[in-house]
Structures are given as structure tokens and as C-alpha cells.
Amino acid sequence: MRPIVLVLNGPNLNLLGTREPATYGHQTLADISALCGRTAEELNLGVEFRQTNHEGELLDWIHAARGRCAGIVINPAAWTHTSVAIRDALVASELPVIEVHLSNVHAREPFRHHSFVSGIALAVMCGFGSHGYRLALEHFSLRFKEQGA
């Protein structure tokens, strides 16, 4: 059975491709979902790709992943800097987490430099654009192989 990685995306990422393309690029969320699907297939992983603009829905998805998924890739978007609830849900899931950001948040406004997720994440990918999602899935694949999963 293939390990399942849950790929979660936070608010406003549904607008990718049209929202601030100089910062976030021209790829749409559907393009990134397809990239994750292809990458997962190559790596023999299962992947579930989701996006929401509702924090409670994201929390429910994290809770439901516990015991069902092997890891979580999350782009919390603006919630990165504001949500202790998401951090706590990720800890409670007892799953390894990789945080992904399309832009280099450390080269942007100072309020974006703090993340509630980074401190509990296995790794943080930022500034790689959509390639950060691929890197996260590749890292999980290597980790699962090392663990014999």
C-alpha cells in the first residue's frame, strides 16, 4: 500500500495564476495539483490535494489525517503568521509536516518572517515556487523508504 501524503493549501491560493503573478507566478492551483499528482505517481505515493479559505475546514482535514496519512505538506498561506490553532492541530496529528511557500517569505514584509508552523515542521521549502511541493514530496518519499514504509 502506498503511503498517503495530504497536501493542504490555505487562503487565497485558489487565486494563483491571477493574484500577484510577480510574487506567486503564473501557475494555477490546478497546475500545482497536477504537478503533485505526477510527482506522487513517480514516487509511488498516494496524494490528496486540497485548498480552503476556511480555517475550521483546514483543521478538520488535519484531524482526519491522523492515523490515515503518512505525512502532511502544508502551505498555510496567510495563516502561517496568525494561526496557533493550525500549529496545534498539526502537532496533534502526530504526522511529519513539511511547510511550503511559493515565495521567499523572508525576503518580504517583516510580518511574514514569523511562522507558527516552521518550529514543528520537518522541513520548510520557501522561494522555490511550485517546485517546493515536488521537493517536499521527494523528501517524504526518501524518508518513507528509509523507514521501510
Image: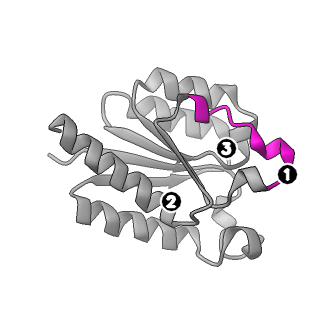
Is the N terminus in the top left, top right, bottom left or bottom right quadrant? top left
Q: Secondary structure at mark 3?
A: loop
> What residue is shown at x 48% (from left), y 34% (from top)?
62
Residue 115: image x %, image y %?
69, 37
Q: Secondary structure at mark 1?
A: loop
Whichever of labels 1 and 3 marks the residue nearer the N terminus, that label is 3
Whichever of labels 2 and 1 marks the residue nearer the N terminus, that label is 1
Task: Give the numbered dot on residue 26.
Answer: none
Magenta residue check for 94: no
Q: Residues within 10 Å of mark 1 (few under 14, many from 20)?
A: few
Mark 2–mark 1 Cα distance, whole angstroms, equals 21 Å
Which residue position is annotated with label 2? 132
Residue 17: image x %, image y %?
66, 75
Whichever of labels 2 and 3 marks the residue nearer the N terminus, that label is 3
Which residue position is annotated with label 1? 109
Which residue position is annotated with label 3? 54
Is the C terminus in the top left, top right, bottom left or bottom right quadrant? top left
Residues at marks 1 and 3 touching, judged by CB atoms closer than 8 Å: no
Mark 1–mark 3 Cα distance, whole angstroms, equals 24 Å
**In the figure, is residue 134 to the left or right of 149?**
right
The range drawn in magenta is: 108-119
